Amino acid sequence: MTPQEQWEAWWAYHRANPDIWENFVRLTFIKIKQGHPRHSADSIMHAVRYEVDTDPVTSDKYKICNNYVAFYARLFADEFPDHAGFFRYRCSMADEFFGPL
């Protein structure tokens, strides 16, 4: 899959499933408020998966591709620049769309 195709797939998923982003942001800010100087975006997404999977209303609705975690982490840094360093970033296709952090 090309970077452009990956971006388009993630963007369509993101727009169709806003509660994934809302949970990602909420759980990230919990870690920030707990005093964590850094945390894993992958860990946050696993917590989102757990919460969504245990919700009887949404459990069959969501499947979250691992490739999307980099996009969510970069979107968080873009939306909340005061916390841009909270996640560590490896080179990713997402860099083409958010820029390297």
Image (cartoon, rainbow, N blue to C red):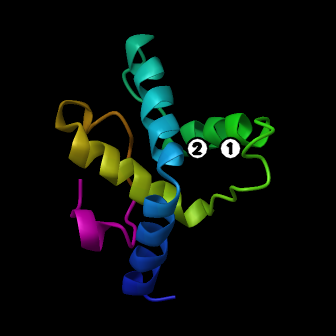
Is residue 25 depicted above or below 31 in this figure?
below
Q: Quadrant of residue 67?
A: bottom right
Q: Is residue 95 magenta?
A: yes
Please tell me which residue is depicted at 24% across the width and 43% down the height of the picture. Answer: 79
Please tell me which residue is depicted at 58% across the width and 44% down the height of the picture.
45
Q: Element under label 1? A: helix
Region of the chain picked out in magenta, as a range? 90-101
Contact, CB < 8 Å: mark 1 with mark 2?
yes
Residue at the (33%, 44%) spot, across then down: 76
Residue 47 vs residue 63, the one in the foreground: 63
Callout 2 crowding tier (Cα within 10 Å): few <14, some 14–19, many ≥20: many
As drawn, the residue found furthest toward the bottom would be 2
Q: Is residue 50 left or right of residue 91?
A: right
Gap between marks 1 and 2 measured at Cα: 6 Å
> Where residue 17 sits: x, y (%)?
53, 55
Quickly name the residue at label 2. Answer: 45
Left or right: 101 as drawn, with respect to 47? left
Tag of residue 60? none
User: Does residue 57 lie above or below 6 as drawn?
Assistant: above
Residue on which disc 1 sits: 49
